[in-house]
Amino acid sequence: AGNALQCTVKHFLSVDLNGSVKVNDKFTFYAIVQNLFDAHAPFDPNTYGGNNYNPAWAASGIIGRSIKAGANFKF
C-alpha cells in the first residue's frame, strides 16, 4: 500500500502581472511579470515520478519569477 501522505499536496498561489501603455496608434510599451511573489510549488512525489514527465515544461512554480518587457510598433 502507498503512503497516504502522497495523496495531498500543499497549496500555493502564483500571481501574474501584465501591463501596457499605448503611446499612440502605432507604438505600445508592455511589461509582464510571471509569478510576481516568486512562489515555489510544493514537492509532489507522485507527479515528479510520473512516466515521461518533465516538470520544467509547464508546471507552475518550477521556474520562479520571470520578467518580460518590450515595445510593439505597427507600420
Image (tube, rainbow, N blue to C red):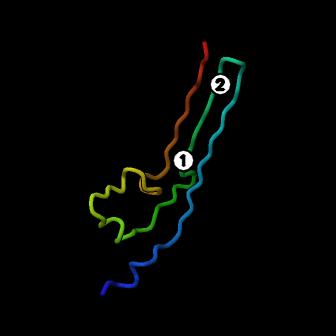
**Quick check: marks 1 and 2 in contact, CB under 8 Å?**
no
The answer to whether 73 appears left or right of 10 in the picture is right
Q: Secondary structure at mark 2?
A: strand
Above or below, 52 relative to 75: below
The residue drawn where x is 59% and y is 23% is: 72
Dot label at residue 43: none
Q: Earlier in the sequence, mark 1 or mark 2?
A: 2
At 51% across and 59% down in the image, what residue appears? 39
> Is residue 74 shown above or below 68?
above
Relative side of 3 to 66, left or right? left
Q: Which residue occupies the foreground of this view, 49 or 15?
A: 49
Local packing at callout 2 (Cα closer than 10 Å; few below 14, some 14-19, many 20+) is some
The residue located at (39%, 69%) in the rendering is 44
Specify whether 44 is left or right of 72.
left
Q: At x 72% / y 19%, what residue is drawn? A: 24
Q: Quadrant of the C terminus?
A: top right
Q: Circle 2 sits on which residue? A: 28
Q: Which amino acid does the dot numbered 1 rest on? A: Gln
Image position of 4 with respect to 9: above or below? below
Q: Residue 21 location in percent, x, y?
A: 69, 30
- Place of residue 3 in the rendered image (x, y in percent of width and height, measured from the top left): 34, 84
| Vertical side of 1 occupied by 62: above or below | above
**Quarter residue 31 falls in:** top right
The picture quadrant where one finds residue 1 is bottom left
Residue 55 percent coordinates (x, y): 36, 56
Dot 2 amino acid type: Thr
Q: CA distance from mark 1 to mark 2?
A: 20 Å
Q: Position of residue 69 (x, y in %)?
A: 55, 33
Badge 1 is on which residue? 34
